[in-house]
Amino acid sequence: MKRLVLAAAAAALLASPAAAALKPGAKAPVFTAPGFLAGDPVTLSLAEALKKGPVVLYFFPAAHTSGCNLEAHLFSEAIDQFKAQNATVIGITAGNVKELAAFSKETEHCGGKFAVAADVGAKIARQYDSVMIVKPDWSDRTSYVIAPNGVILHAYSKLDPSDHVAQTLGAVKAYNTKK
């Protein structure tokens, strides 16, 4: 009985949405990180990406895990919609970073359509308060939309990957409508 209660408590913890600490209006921490685009190594700079327009920065727990596979695929399917809004999508993870090159090019994941960054030791995730409670060396699933001036426009944290694209695309469209 005790195991059942502990298992239920653990499942509830994993299923509950995290609360992103960085709220709209906060300044996004600037970072530079190694990453991959279509399997090729790149250096990702938030400052450089913001020069082009809004940035969708989405943290995901680990490459080649079921939820992260789905989320990356959903972002890759919607990438043309983000580009039409002059938005750059950057995925970032602290988990399974050695698998990011393959993850970035595989059709069933990123498909080479956007870059993913390696956050070794979850240093960037900590700045964005996006670390998993149960695995503090892994990123949590949190998506941010950041305006070109570096201000966070939208933050969405939920372990279920299915609504992150709709949330961020909606925020980018709202931003572009207001400017």
Image (tube, helix red, strand yellow):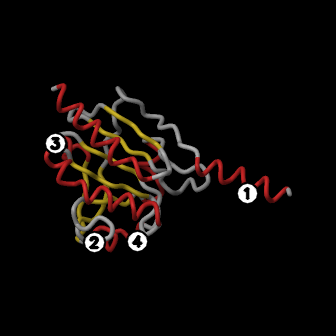
Q: Which mark, residue 98?
A: 4
The amino acid marked with disc number 1 is Ala
Q: Position of residue 1 (x, y in %)?
A: 86, 57
Taking the image as shown, residue 84 lies to the left or right of residue 109, namely: left
Q: Which mark, residue 7?
A: 1
The amino acid marked with disc number 2 is Thr
Q: Are marks 2 and 3 in contact (CB under 8 Å)?
A: no
CA separation, marks 4 and 2?
18 Å
Q: Which mark, residue 107?
A: 2
Q: Going 73% across and 57% down the picture, which residue do you hit?
A: 7
Residue toward you, 42 or 38: 38
Q: Secondary structure at mark 3?
A: loop
Residue toward you, 67 or 27: 67
The correct choice, above or below, for 133 with respect to 105 in the image is above
Q: Please identify, in this view, whether the residue under mark 4 or under mark 3 is nearer the observer.
A: 3
Q: Position of residue 65 (x, y in %)?
A: 47, 67
CA separation, marks 2 and 3?
23 Å
